[in-house]
Amino acid sequence: NYPFCTIEPNVGVVAVPDPRLDKLAEMYEPDKKTPAVIEFVDIAGLVKGASQGAGLGNKFLENIRRTDAIVHVVRCFDDENIMHVVADASQNVPVDPLGDIETIDLELIMADLEMVNRRVEKATKATKGDKKFLHEAEVFKALAEHLNAGKSARTFDCGDDRAIVETADLLSLKPIIYAANMDEEGFAHYEDNKYFGLVRDLAAKEGAQVLPICAKLEQDIAELDDPEERAMFLEDLGIEKSGLDRLIQCSYDLLGLISFLTYGKDECRAWTIRKGTKAPQAAGKIHSDIERGFIRAETINFDEMMACGSVAAAKEKGLLRSEGKDYVVKDGDMIYFRFN
């Protein structure tokens, strides 16, 4: 029972689990193993009226604005000892996952509506000097109507005008994962959990992801330092991966991110790039000089390498490719960059 105990956002930088990197480290025994990372920002919950400054208000909307995606932790368990946080903390009200989601969504939508109305105004003024802004004004007017109906920007059918909509930096346009937080009993049979079912059905309508978790179990898992002990604990629970590992992977996919790998005695490392990144820009992740002087990328995918047993064996079979500046890097590519 700690409403608004998070005043400043808490930032956690976590390693992206990658068995491929672990295998490379086993093979090369490098001085250093560096995983890809993802940053989570824990922002306090919003209450009704946040867009007008209620609770911790606009400050938290601003914190959300700086993120690439939203993980919305939704309460999906009953416990009379833990109050359901609402604006009036003196009242205990029933658990209501859909109502909670709607409260947050509406605050994000209200903040977006203000932003979109400003864009309509700006584009309308600009049309007096240049008619090309007419279409932009029309797009934002249609979006304002959509938001006014209590619908998020994510569900706005913008077709070819998505690039215009994205210039507005809207909160309710951000991709979302609903983390359905259950107690241990509810999590053990989450498919039958009525609250989880409600969140899952809503996520399906929105094209969002939903992740069943139990924060209490995650706390217990986090307290186990020994990897073997942790693995045994997960096995006893009948789950393959911790909720945190599943959330990291889910977030990585949601943001359209992939990893490429560099390898050697000095360091084995996973690098984060967006899907569709070409080889020189991937090289730029390592160092801008490598991007500037890019000559070629000597590439083999991790799975191909494993099938051969080593990079040397793959090279003998002619599977190590020399790729130029138009090569689009794939997830799991092992790359050695040649540069001037």
Image (tube, rainbow, N blue to C red):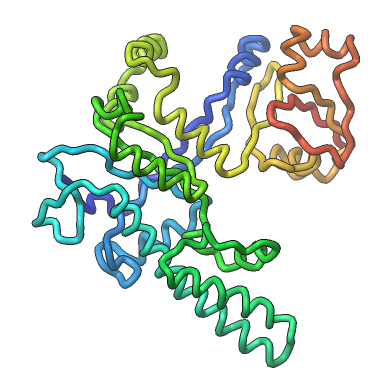
Q: Residue at x 65, y 15 (%)?
A: 24
Q: Residue at x 50, y 79 (%)?
A: 117
Where, by quadrant of the figure, is residue 33 drawn?
top right
**Quarter of the picture holding the C terminus:** top right
245 to 132, vertically: above or below: above
Residue 133 x %, y %: 69, 81
**Quarter of the picture holding the N terminus:** top left
Where, by quadrant of the figure, is residue 26 drawn?
top right
Q: Which one is in front, 70 or 103?
A: 103
Q: Residue at x 66, y 86 (%)?
A: 126
Q: Which one is in front, 9 or 191?
A: 191
Residue 62 x %, y %: 42, 62
Q: Which one is in front, 173 or 324?
A: 173
* Numbered circles on residues, count: 0
287 to 149, vertically: above or below: above
Residue 220 falls left or right of residue 262: left
Where, by quadrant of the figure, is residue 73 drawn?
top left
Residue 251 falls left or right of residue 323: left
Residue 16 x %, y %: 53, 30
Residue 281 x %, y %: 76, 44
Q: Residue at x 79, y 42 (%)?
A: 278
321 to 101, vertically: above or below: above
Q: Which one is in front, 321 or 165?
A: 165
Residue 222 falls left or right of residue 148: left
Q: Of all residues shown, which one is farthest toward the bottom?
A: 128
